[in-house]
Image (cartoon, grey):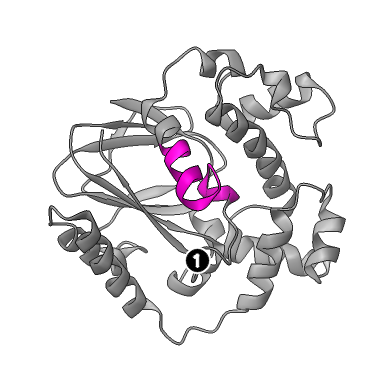
Amino acid sequence: MRDQVYPEWANIRLTSDGAMAACTGPGPLQACGPICGIGPTSRATHFELSPGRYWTISLLPLGWARLMQVPARAFADRWEVIGESSAFARFAPLLELAATDDPKEAVARFDACLVSLFGARKVDEAAIVRAHSVLLDPEVPSVNAFADQAGLSVRQLERLANSAFGFTPKLLLRRQRFLRSLAKFMLDPSLAWVDTLDSQYVDQAHFIRDFRRFMDETPGSYASRSHPVLWAAAHARSAAAGTAMQVLQHPVAAGQGIAIERTRP
């Protein structure tokens, strides 16, 4: 089964009995199983799954800051299979914990493992959550407004974005604007694109430019194909968490900055 993931925050993806291949941005698919770490993305990730059970553990900006030892910018639009030398190596035990037929048992195991990884690393949690919350506000139109509402200087916001979010404040705002529009379409593909446009778009041409930037194709091309995994996931996530996308999820609702999802093609 093939599909593509819109830009999002970092993830750990694993499978106990399947096979997966992926590519962020244009290019050939490459094997990425049985467990891989993915940094925050600003381009669509194309992927292929064989029949099996798959898990995604999302690291929101706070989760990245608390659990990773490298800046998020270092893994922007990058992923790697998790091995001993991987920056994501501390997540390798999750693969063995997935070996159960009971999804609730697997989640409990994952929770226990992830909680054990939270050490004494000092990060400015309040600043990260505050900036993340401001980023989710559709009324924030500019980097200056972003910084002002986050209680930071523009330079401070840039440093925070580099370490915990992975991209410049300007690109983060642009990505968020685009994904608010895409989420509406994913929940109701019968909508015309013009009816999904975020209030910050000047016109449809403006949206199309963003669509090409983030998805590497036109809106028409995207809509012409079936998206069995992502559209189903959008509805399930919306029902369970109140948002169609991980990247639209409020940081407080995610607890310590982590969210766990299960997929079965």
Q: Which residue is mark 1?
A: 257
Quarter of the view holding residue 105: bottom left
Position of the C terminus, as image quadrant, is top left
Identify which residue is drawn at 67% across, 44% down. 176
Residue 205's x, y, as percent? 77, 19
Q: Viewed as shown, does residue 242 lie left or right of 106?
A: right
Secondary structure at badge 1 equals loop
Give me the residue at 23% from left, 68% from top.
Answer: 109
Count of numbered badges drawn on the protein: 1
- Residue placed at 51% from the left, 49% from the top? 246
> Residue 234 lies in magenta, yes or no?
yes
In front here: 217 or 192?
A: 192
Which residue is rendered at x = 21% and y = 43% of the image? 53
In the orientation shown, which residue stands out farthest toward the front? Answer: 239
Q: Position of residue 32 (x, y in %)?
A: 27, 43
Q: Position of residue 54 (x, y in %)?
A: 26, 45
Vertical relation: 165 (above or below) 45:
below
In this rendering, position of residue 246 left or right of residue 219: left
Residue 245 lies, with reference to residue 46, above or below; the image says: below
**Majority secondary structure of the magenta segment?**
helix
Q: Which residues are magenta?
A: 233-248
Residue count near mark 1 (Cα–Cα under 10 Å), binned few <14, some 14–19, many ≥20: many
**Residue 229: x %, y % from top left:** 37, 32
Q: Is residue 62 above or below residue 134?
A: below
Compared across the picture, whether 77 is left or right of 138 comes to left
Residue 76 visible somewhere in the drawing: no
**One can see residue 133 in this view:** yes
Nearer-the-camera pick, 175 or 257 = 257
The kind of residue on which mark 1 rests is: Gly
Say whether residue 200 is magenta.
no
